[in-house]
């Protein structure tokens, strides 16, 4: 992992076309601005983690268990 120290309004450049700018630094938060081409997806890490966990949970449920659950709601 590369660790870089930056101040407000300073930036880093990633691969010639992604600029990350420090917009604001407060007590326990840093606000970042990201400028990148539209074809590059930018998503918060915790959302990717949640998507992966949901996907794994959905795969664990067998079709029989799902059908049993659906049938129990009909009664």
Image (cartoon, grey):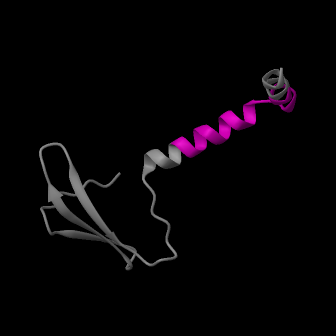
Near-viewer residue (33 or 15) = 33
From the viewer's perspective, tell me whether residue 25 is left or right of residue 47: left
Q: Is residue 36 above or below residue 63?
A: below
| Image quadrant where residue 61 sits | top right
What residue is shown at x 52% (from left), y 76% (from top)? 39
Q: Is residue 47 magenta?
A: no
What residue is shown at x 39% (from left), y 79% (from top)? 17
Percent position (x, y) of residue 55?
A: 66, 42
Q: Quadrant of the C terminus?
A: top right
What residue is shown at x 87% (from left), y 27% (from top)? 64
Near-viewer residue (65 or 60) = 65
Give the total of numbered labels: 0
| Image quadrant where residue 59 sits | top right
Q: Is residue 58 magenta?
A: yes
Percent position (x, y) of residue 14?
A: 36, 71
Percent position (x, y) of residue 8?
A: 13, 63
What residue is shown at x 49% (from left), y 71% (from top)? 40
Q: Is residue 52 above or below residue 22?
A: above
From the viewer's perspective, tell me whether residue 65 is left or right of residue 49: right
Q: Is residue 27 above or below residue 4?
A: above
From the viewer's perspective, tell me whether residue 61 is left or right of residue 67: left
Find the magenta span and give its range. Answer: 50-67
| Image quadrant where residue 42 sits | bottom left
Q: Main secondary structure of the magenta part?
A: helix
């Amino acid at each position: 992992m590369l660790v870089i120290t930056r101040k407000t309004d300073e930036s880093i450049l990633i691969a010639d076309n992604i600029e990350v700018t420090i917009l604001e630094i407060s007590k326990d938060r840093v606000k970042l601005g990201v400028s990148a081409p539209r074809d590059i997806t930018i998503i918060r890490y915790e959302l990717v983690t949640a998507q992966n966990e949901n996907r794994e949970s959905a795969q664990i449920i067998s079709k029989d268990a799902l059908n049993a659950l659906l049938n129990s709601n009909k009664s």
